[in-house]
Amino acid sequence: MSHEFAWDELALLWNGNNYGGVHDWLGERWNHLIQSRPDGHEDTDACFLQGLAFAALAFHFSRNRNLEGAALLADDALNVLPTFLPAYRGVQVEPVIDTLNALRPLLDGLAPDAECPLPVDLFKKLSYQQSA
């Protein structure tokens, strides 16, 4: 696998709020990277994909009444993604972090199966610039 990723595919899923599909898309590529690259789990591309996957799963859980899982994965994403600011491989990381930062404090104190406290239209879109 080259260092180039089909961010347009990912953006279609992400911007359509299909965060389960996003997680699957990222998971396939992450799994390939950790098995095929010498640094395995420590590979920088793999770490980035894992951070995005944490965010996607946090968003997915928040939309599907699993706020406890959403909070845990939002925390994981917020521990990984700031390393890649402002952008990594063409993906703008700040909008993802902005959505996590808006969502995460709203999850505290809610019932684990409550509805998502952040309207889906406030989830920022995935922005990227494909390499030429």
Image (cartoon, rainbow, N blue to C red):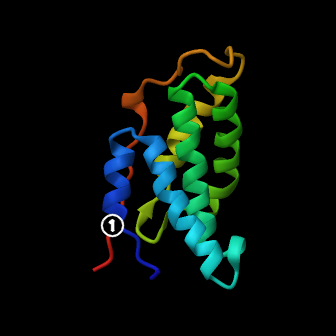
Does residue 112 appear to the left or right of 28 in the view shown? right
- Measuring 55% from the left and 62% from the top, which residue is drawn there? 49
Residue lying at the far left of the rendered structure: 132
Q: Residues within 10 Å of mark 1 (few under 14, many from 20)?
A: few
Residue 118: percent from left, percent from top: 49, 24
The residue lying toward the viewer, choosing from 85 and 113, is 113
- The quadrant in which residue 16 appears is top left
Quarter of the figure with the C terminus? bottom left
- Measuring 54% from the left and 54% from the top, which residue is drawn there? 52
Residue 47: percent from left, percent from top: 63, 66
Tell me the kind of residue under disc 1.
Answer: Gln
Residue 70: percent from left, percent from top: 63, 34
- Measuring 61% from the left and 48% from the top, which residue is drawn there? 54
Residue 73: percent from left, percent from top: 66, 42
Determine if residue 41 is in view. yes
Determine if residue 127 is in view. no
The residue lying toward the viewer, choosing from 103 and 9, is 9
User: Which residue is label 1 attached to?
Assistant: 129
